[in-house]
Image: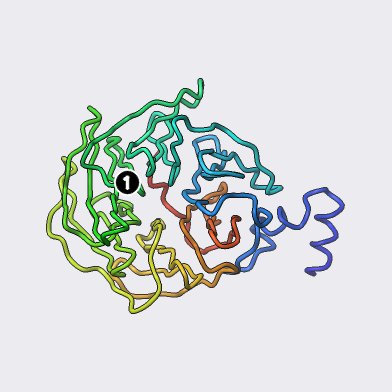
Amino acid sequence: MKKHIYLLAMMTGYGVQALAQHPASAALYEARDLTKENMFSVNIEGPNFDKAGNFYVVNFKQDGTIGKINTRTGAGEIFVSLPDSSVANGVHFNSKGNMFLPDFKGHNVLMVDMKTKKISVYAHSDKFNQPNDLCINKKDQIYASDPNWAKSTGQLWRIDANRKPVLLETGMGTTNGIELSPDEKTLYVNESVQRNIWKYDVDNAGNISHKTLFATFPDFGFDGMKCDKAGNLYIARWGKGTIAVLSPKGKLIREIPLKGKECSNLTFGDKDGKTVYVTLQDRKCVETFRVGIAGTRIERN
């Protein structure tokens, strides 16, 4: 059967990489390559989709670019190049379809107008360490992790619609991955070096409270996180080369092995939302695997 599917893919011109994305032919939780190795810089991060289903990944070919990647062929092109030596760490969209980029080198959150490709500074604070990862709620409030890697410390910010950064917490560990639960009533934040995942209650105004330890691991590191529609949390285990899946109660459901070890971030995509796209910094490429439960877009777009 697999041989027949493979031959069909060749005859129709889809190729092996596209075949790997096809729901009918992909086993669950089995990693496959989407792109070739070394298509990105070592800072490959932040995969995401816009409303139209276009796929973007930061630092395509070199730092300071946003790549637009074909999910059928794995080929890519530069969508925009960032000014002023900025380097983005992720791609995020609000309800209006604007692209937001945490610029860890310029200490900004940048905004890209998707029609004109004009890039502007959406938010800046002299108190930013280096904005690392974002998640955006339905009200277009942005939550940002803000680590200081040299000191193994971190901060947590909210950026409101008026573009004003609000410092929510300081004195944390190395804050990195950040994600909202599907109902937006819980905010998850991890600390890469300390290997803790914290959760907060979120009220209607976007304020956080009741910080509690959600989970902790004894080894390796953490990076990006995303939720599925059941509220399970997918966590990039940087250095181990797995995606850990935790239930809403913090119980480890499974760990999904990848080909590479330095997995930096992930997102859910495809029409059914059941393909996970993962960026690998050691291989400088994108891997994918299929899952049984669709993901929630952190941008809620």
Across and down, in percent, residue 16 comes to 76, 58
**Where residue 62 sits: x, y (%)?**
58, 44
**Residue 201 falls in image quadrant:** bottom left
Name the spot of residue 98 as percent of width and height, x first: 42, 30
Q: Residue at x 19, y 50 (%)?
A: 202
**Residue nearest the viewer, comparing 278 with 171:** 171
Image quadrant occupied by the C terminus: top left
- The residue singled out by tag 1 in the image is 130
Q: Residue 86: x, y in percent?
A: 43, 37
Q: Quadrant of residue 94?
A: top left
Quadrant containing the N terminus is bottom right
Which residue sits furthest top? 116
Can you see residue 292? Answer: yes
The image quarter containing residue 288 is: bottom right
Q: Residues within 10 Å of mark 1 (few under 14, many from 20)?
A: many
262 vs 63, nearest the viewer: 63
* 72 left or right of 103 in image: right
Q: Is residue 299 visible?
A: no
